[in-house]
Image (spheres, coloured by chain):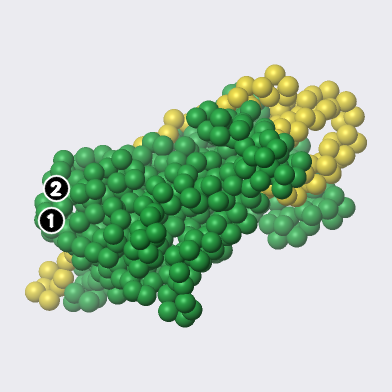
Amino acid sequence: MLEKMGKPGVFINCTTFDDDAKSASADNGMPALRRVKISSQDFYKLRGKVETVRPLVESVFDDIIDALTEPLTAEESSPPEGKDGVEDTAGVTVTAESYPAAAEEFNRIFLENRWGDGLPMVPPTPERVKWMLSGTKRKPDDVLGKINPKQGTATIEKIAVNAVMAGAKPEYLPVIIAVIEAITDEEFDDLHVLASAGSFNLLTVVSGPIAEEIGMESGIGFMGHGWRANNTIGRAIRLATLNIGQTWPGKNDMALTGRISPHTFFTFCENADMSPWEPYHASRGFKAGDSCVTVGSIHGESQLQHFYGGMIGTWTAEGILDRMVEDLVRTDRRGYFMWGTKGVGKYVGSGGGAMNHMIILFPELVAELKKIGFDQKGLQDEIYKRTSVPYEELNEHERKSIQTAMELGVIPADRKDVFTAALKPGGKVPVLIAPEDLHFFAAGGAPGCAFSFNYYRIPPYNRSALMTKRITGATLTKAGKLD
Amino acid sequence: MSEQTVKLELLNPRGMVEAMPVSAPNPRIADLTGKRIGLYWNSKPGLDNFYKVFEELLKERYPTATTTWLRGAFLIRDDDADAWLPQIDTFVYGVGD
């Protein structure tokens, strides 16, 4: 940005991120941006102390000075017009002596082009794509939006092509389209979840009657394998984001461990049959009878919180509620220190500040919670209240951080009164910004277990990382037909 | 084509990417003597140590050059950029990756 605003500069990046840095430079319209590479192996090992990193800095010092002072070359001064990263989107023809040989060749070519996910795919022939499109009223050239990092255009047809490759069926297509509508929403941060080194992941929950109609599984094993609807909807999302946004591991998708559940993300549905609550989307302002998808970014490999239940030990609703409260206080209070900063991204409070929690409750637990008087709103309020920390228990740094959070706007204006009242002797300071930052999904079988994913309330690169969209335009199901 | 030959026409799954308007980097500053150099850092650990050594080496070679640490987000915020522009002549950008 500083370079675009007229200042000459140099971008230093580690060798591991060189392709990513090059790609980002092109994506931002400055492919000839001057960069200096430093050895990842050396930097990450030596950066801990001034004295250990010194030889590394000495080894690249002249390169950095040269990048700042040496005149631009003719090539740098006149970079070729905007074709870097722009691919030909023409189709491919494969011929072979047999169908198995043609299918093998198709898979080889697509994977070699980085158009696949590593598992065998279904060939996206025009006939097959037309069949897929029969599941929606939407026109093939309808544009939903752009997918990061390359800002590829998501059309209904491109989504259908990827859905075919994933092995999905036409009746799943409206669900997949709704997910991509969420991902391409102008306020949704798809860049962080699709490209960050932090191995973040995508959670997709389908709620409402369409889930049962298309055969989604929400019983025992609901997040696992064996369910064509769950698995291929998730895989279609994986392939569509990979292909439309144009990511590749180690190139511009820098997830260090990869994204767990890499071929399908985490894709499941609520258990409407067994849950006595209204579907989740009703808490987001949609009609209970609608069918919706909720898409949320979640932490990577280590942020799953287990609240138990199930068949190993005995459980009660009160006991699981206690465990949730204890866990949330323990994990979220650690974040107070970040509240008093602007955050890591464009918007205040981004990448820290406070969390969203996506909590999966098994239907038997939901029934027990209902018996003791909790609906979703009541449970949000109860947990919010019980996870608040007495003012006297906060250290000086935590108090100052929360005060600063109010001044910076990390705590939004409509929550300021709550925190002002809490931040004084006798008060109790919430670890969450608002009760609505707790999101409950009823899923799983009997027995089941309760657990939670979390993620930043405000993501690093945009305003939101949790979005619900209504499923529309379906032609093959009773649900999701609305335009 | 023989009767045994199978032909598959395959649609392309990639999203269309519009060509981005391209701009060249800015002309360089020929000599850093007396210049103000911004050091951009997003707080990831270790880059601060890197910059401390860089400042020392810079001071040895260009005693009158000055440095300003620009501490910001993963991507530079608009308000930060506006505030920093008058303070620097050139800059080093790193995010610790």
Please state if B7 lies on the left or on the right of A417 as rendered.
Answer: left
Residue A329 picture quarter: bottom right
Residue farthest along the left direction in this orientation: B3
Q: Position of residue A425 (x, y in %)?
A: 70, 38
Q: Is residue A421 above or below residue A294?
A: above
Taking the spot 46% from the left edge, 46% from the top edge, the residue there is: A381
- Does residue A161 appear in this view? no
Whether callout 1 and callout 2 share a subunit is answered yes
Which one is in front, A169 or A275?
A275
Asked if the residue at tag 2 contacts the one at tag 1, i.e. Cβ–Cβ closer than 8 Å, the answer is yes
Amino acid type, callout 2: Lys
Q: Position of residue A254 (x, y in %)?
A: 54, 55
- For label 1, the SS is loop
Please state if A335 lies on the left or on the right of A301 as rendered.
Answer: right
Q: Which chain, by letter, is green?
A: A
Using the image, name the chain to which the residue with label 2 belongs. Answer: A
Task: Kindly identify which numbered label has been placed on residue A481.
Answer: 2
Q: Position of residue A28 (x, y in %)?
A: 50, 36
- The residue singled out by tag 1 in the image is A477
Which one is in front, A86 or A347?
A347
Q: Which chain, by letter, is yellow?
A: B
Taking the spot 44% from the left edge, 65% from the top edge, the residue there is: A317
